[in-house]
């Protein structure tokens, strides 16, 4: 009797998801960010008379549209805080700092930002702080470099919010906010086997022993029946396009000319469709039911794209349950 081969060690790899998020601004957000560029902090007054900073365009209590802008002070009070001993890439300060919620004088809500403090013992709820403006400002929340502690002059009366028309020269109309997530990904035993199979130019899924559904990529368990999927099943390599989209916007750092087609492909023998790019045919000739086969990457570790096989299109009834 031959002993079964031990399962492969689960893979681990660092992964970074990063993209620029671009959005346009309405009149309220535009005024707020343009105001920061001009060292002016604006809030918006609600129907009940409260002042929200940062401002929003609709009343959170009544959903009414809000347009009454007011200017609040660059000083305020810490309402709660958390110490950050190890700042990460892209955070406001390179040295340890506190994340704080600050209710600016004249506002009824708190603004999240960084507080420059020598240590956690220097931070407390109720601490009086003021804005430290960035030397160069462009109309972004980073125009506030951080907050810093300061001593109140008790002789100075509390500043009331003042009406503001929100008008500035060259208003900010849109922003680009970079988003980045760094983490270590471990696919688990089931997907580790799947990835090892791809390295051999084989696509291997797992079958549920209860409902017989074949999952590709495998998940280790059937989400419907809740049992382990231990039976390995090789599927494909050919498959059928079940649905698709035409991509007309070129992604940064992706060396693929637009337009191109991205599709759901049901590999022969699989119980659900996976994602793949379609090439080797004009984009306007891709269709539901098109039969395709993989074209492997130069290093042979995964299908770079799928191309038509030249077979007749699959009948709709053979893949309609996989849409």
Image (cartoon, helix red, strand yellow):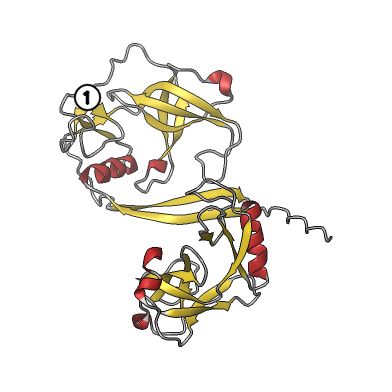
Which picture quadrant has residue 161? Answer: top left
Residue 35 visible, this angle: yes
- Few, some or many C-alpha atoms within 10 Å of disc 1 (few <14, some 14-19, many ≥20)? some
List the residue tagged with mark 1.
Answer: 50
| Vertical placement of residue 157 versus 272, above or below | above
Percent from the top left, x then y, of residue 305?
51, 75
Outermost residue, right direction? 1
| Vertical placement of residue 310 versus 144, above or below | below
Nearer to the camera, 134 or 275: 275
| Quadrant including the N terminus | bottom right
Which residue is depicted at the point 38% across and 77% down? Answer: 289
Which residue is depicted at the point 42% across and 46% down? Answer: 136
Q: Secondary structure at mark 1?
A: loop
Nearer to the camera, 146 or 181: 181
| Vertical placement of residue 7 versus 79, above or below | below
Percent from the top left, x then y, of residue 140?
37, 45
Percent from the top left, x then y, of residue 74?
34, 29
Which residue is depicted at the point 40% across and 79% down? Answer: 314
């Amino acid at each position: 009797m031959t002993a079964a081969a031990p399962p492969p060690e689960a893979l681990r790899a660092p992964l970074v998801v990063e993209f620029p998020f671009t959005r346009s601004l309405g009149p309220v957000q535009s005024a707020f960010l343009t105001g920061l560029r001009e060292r002016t902090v604006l809030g918006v007054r609600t129907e009940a008379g409260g002042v929200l900073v940062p401002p929003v365009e609709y009343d959170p209590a009544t959903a009414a549209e809000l347009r009454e802008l007011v200017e609040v002070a660059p000083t305020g009070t810490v309402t709660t805080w958390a110490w950050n001993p190890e700042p990460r890439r892209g955070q406001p300060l390179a040295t340890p700092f506190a994340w704080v919620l600050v209710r600016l004088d004249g506002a009824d809500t708190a603004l999240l930002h960084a507080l420059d403090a020598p240590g956690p013992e220097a931070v407390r709820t109720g601490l009086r702080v003021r804005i430290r403006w960035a030397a160069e400002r462009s109309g972004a929340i980073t125009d506030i470099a951080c907050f810093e502690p300061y001593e109140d002059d008790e002789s100075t009366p509390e500043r009331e919010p003042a009406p503001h028309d929100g008008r500035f020269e060259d208003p900010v109309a849109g922003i680009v906010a970079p988003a980045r997530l760094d983490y270590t990904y471990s696919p688990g035993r089931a997907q580790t086997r799947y990835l090892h199979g791809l390295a051999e130019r084989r696509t291997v899924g797992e079958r549920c022993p209860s409902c017989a559904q074949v999952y590709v990529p495998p998940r280790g368990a059937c989400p419907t029946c809740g049992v382990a999927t231990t039976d390995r099943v090789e599927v494909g390599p050919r498959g059928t396009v079940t649905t698709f989209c035409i991509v007309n916007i070129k992604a940064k750092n992706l060396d693929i000319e637009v337009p191109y087609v991205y599709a759901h492909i049901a590999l022969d023998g699989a119980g659900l469709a996976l994602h793949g790019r379609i090439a080797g045919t004009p984009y306007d000739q891709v269709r539901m039911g098109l039969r395709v086969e993989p074209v492997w990457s130069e290093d042979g570790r995964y299908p770079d794209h799928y191309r038509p096989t030249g077979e007749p299109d699959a009948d709709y009834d053979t893949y309609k349950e996989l849409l």
